[in-house]
Image: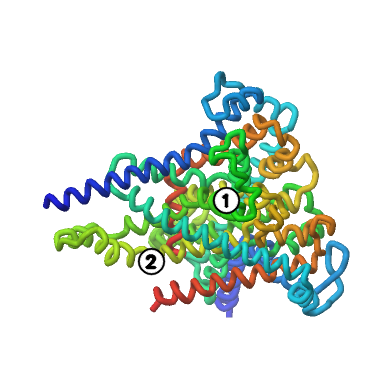
């Protein structure tokens, strides 16, 4: 008995130590990022690691007033919200059929969609660029939005089909007896019950769409349509030695995803673990 | 007769209703995600100087890649770098991820908080993480001394791999946490009553339970790493400095397909061939995972 207690306290200390070290390893770079963004350039050289002497906001102000960062922010928000809206609508429509109106081949169709979870869309980039030029969507936010929707649909259908399957059929039968049409059943009964799952789909998709750098880099050229990651990459070279500006930019690019994650982490982790483990 | 007409009409309405609901998702998914991948493979059999290669040359691009030294050197270099990169990331994320998951699943103070925090870096953009590490490895901050981690041919690639692992280890911890949480407490208690020590507990109960998760974690890393681009762009530029020692398939593909010849462009047809090779490599890994982990589960 005594021996066992000793072992468990020892392993608890080891785990505590591991968690502490890991905490520092995660937080220190993020701390440096935020702290440096709040210092004027001169202070960065004199005091690179310590906390800022005053909360200097000049770096952020320059980013917005001189580098148009507010415009890039707006572009990113447009891409994210239009894409999420379409992903949710299209996925829940399809999921409703796959879950409740199965037909010959619907199981295959479900697997066909879900296979998209593991297919890297980047491998089709050349052809996507060619197609966007053909549609006249090249160098518009529309091109990035279309790609984001296509990337988000597999996860949306995967989570939502699973969720709709759990809604009892009796509920739908009762509605049919009351004279509800199928579209009405979908909008009045299924969608309200689906909201928690929709929240998961939205939060899980928000992050990769906001962070996407590859497709904006390939598809967007004009300054007026740049998204935050693309602008960050292009301004990084321009600012080169103005470290305050660089770190303020990295901080600004991260704030929306970090806040979204911290607020919605419950839905987020739930959606991700379901996506990762059942797939 | 009348009821028959009504019946067919109802049947058609049902089909149309299903089709209408399925079509938006089906069209976008097929035309933006699937067909472009197949079409890119088709383009790998063409050559031409414009944006869209239009002269059919059969396996010409592939023959060039595998026989001419200038091309072969780069593709082989990216392939070997990518394998090293994948191995480092896989070891770090699986081993450290598993032990940290063991820590955060203990009923100890702060474990819940650490579960949440551990995922924080994963939510950031790879580009931001790359730029951030590139900056703080700079001698001004010098958190790892004055050594030129990204300038040295031996340390540059491992440095990139560590940065990526720093970011994505949260994903491994999350998946392992779910696996460990799923082990019935009675099983662990029974083992303890029988006097099993830490290693026996680990070997006979915990490891067998989390084997499928090792598969999923490794698969996610594999697909992510063999299409990785952002980290190279941010830390060592698209030419994979120093001297292509950090060039991965993603940066090779970007250069060959989308850069000017002066900056390493090979033309769209060759770029399509590179992305087709990437597809084969990714499909190979997914295939192995499927046979090793999925088939066993179905049986």
Chain ID for label 2?
B
User: Image point 63% across, 46% down: which residue?
Assistant: B127
User: Image point 33% across, 64% down: which residue?
Assistant: B207
Q: In this view, does A215 lie to the left or right of B287?
A: right
Name the residue nearer the viewer: B92 or A213. Answer: B92
Mark number displayed over residue B211? 2
Chain ID for label 1?
B
Query: What is the x, y in percent for residue B138?
Result: 62, 39
Residue A157, above or below B116: below
Query: What is the x, y in percent for residue A130?
Result: 79, 61
Name the residue nearer the viewer: B94 or A78. Answer: B94
Residue B105, above or below B261: above
Query: What is the x, y in percent for residue B59?
Result: 77, 79
Residue A189, above or below A97: above
User: Image point 78% across, 68% down: which residue?
Assistant: B70
Circle 1 sits in a helix, a strand or a loop, which is it?
A: helix
Query: What is the x, y in percent for residue B159?
Result: 57, 51
| Residue wearing tag 1 | B159
């Amino acid at each position: 008995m005594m021996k066992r207690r000793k072992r468990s306290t020892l392993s608890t200390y080891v785990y505590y130590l591991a968690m502490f070290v890991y905490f520092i390893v995660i937080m220190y770079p993020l701390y440096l990022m935020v702290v440096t963004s709040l210092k004027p350039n001169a202070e960065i050289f004199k005091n690179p690691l310590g906390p800022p002497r005053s909360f200097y906001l000049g770096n952020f102000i320059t980013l917005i007033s001189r580098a148009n960062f507010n415009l890039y922010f707006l572009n990113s928000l447009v891409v994210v919200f239009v894409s999420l809206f379409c992903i949710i609508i299209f996925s829940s429509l399809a999921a409703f059929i796959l879950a409740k109106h199965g037909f010959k081949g619907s199981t295959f169709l479900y697997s066909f969609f879900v296979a998209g979870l593991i297919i890297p869309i980047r491998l089709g980039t050349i052809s996507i660029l060619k197609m966007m030029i053909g549609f006249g969507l090249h160098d518009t936010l529309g091109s990035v939005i279309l790609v984001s929707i296509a990337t988000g649909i597999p996860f949306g259908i995967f989570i939502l089909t699973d969720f709709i399957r759990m809604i009892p059929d009796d509920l739908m039968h009762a509605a049919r007896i009351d004279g509800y049409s199928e579209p009405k059943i979908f909008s009045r009964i299924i969608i309200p019950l689906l909201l928690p799952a929709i929240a998961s789909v939205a939060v899980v998709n928000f992050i990769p769409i906001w962070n996407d750098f590859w497709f904006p880099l390939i598809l967007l050229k004009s300054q007026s349509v740049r998204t935050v990651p693309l602008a960050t990459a292009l301004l990084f070279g321009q600012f080169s030695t103005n470290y305050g500006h660089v770190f303020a930019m990295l901080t600004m690019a991260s704030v929306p995803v970090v806040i979204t994650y911290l607020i919605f982490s419950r839905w987020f982790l739930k959606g991700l673990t379901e996506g990762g483990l059942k797939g | 007769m009348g009821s028959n007409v009504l019946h067919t009409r109802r049947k058609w309405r049902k089909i149309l209703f299903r089709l209408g609901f399925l079509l938006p998702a089906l069209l976008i998914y097929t035309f933006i995600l699937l067909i472009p991948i197949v079409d890119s493979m088709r383009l790998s059999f063409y050559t031409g100087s414009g944006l869209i290669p239009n002269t059919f040359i059969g396996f010409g691009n592939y023959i060039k890649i595998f026989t001419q030294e200038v091309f072969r050197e780069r593709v082989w270099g990216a392939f070997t770098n990518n394998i090293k990169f994948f191995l480092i990331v896989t070891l770090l994320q699986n081993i450290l991820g598993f032990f940290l998951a063991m820590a955060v699943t203990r009923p100890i103070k702060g474990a819940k908080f650490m579960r949440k925090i551990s995922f924080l870096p994963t939510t950031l953009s790879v580009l931001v993480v790359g730029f951030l590490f590139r900056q703080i490895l700079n001698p001004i901050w010098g958190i790892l001394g004055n050594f030129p981690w990204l300038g040295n041919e031996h340390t540059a690639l491992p440095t990139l791999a560590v940065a990526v692992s720093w970011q994505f280890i949260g994903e491994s911890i999350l998946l392992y946490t779910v696996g460990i949480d799923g082990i019935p407490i009675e099983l662990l208690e029974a083992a303890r009553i029988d006097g099993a020590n830490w290693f026996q507990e680990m070997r006979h109960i915990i490891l067998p339970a989390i084997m499928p998760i090792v598969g999923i974690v490794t698969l996610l890393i594999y697909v992510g790493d063999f299409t990785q681009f952002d980290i190279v762009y941010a830390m060592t530029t698209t030419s994979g400095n120093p001297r292509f020692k950090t060039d991965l398939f993603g940066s090779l593909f970007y250069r060959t397909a989308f850069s000017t010849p002066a900056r390493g462009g090979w033309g769209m047809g060759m770029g399509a061939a590179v992305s087709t090779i990437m597809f084969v490599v990714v499909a190979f890994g997914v295939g192995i995972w499927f046979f090793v982990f999925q088939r066993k589960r179905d049986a």
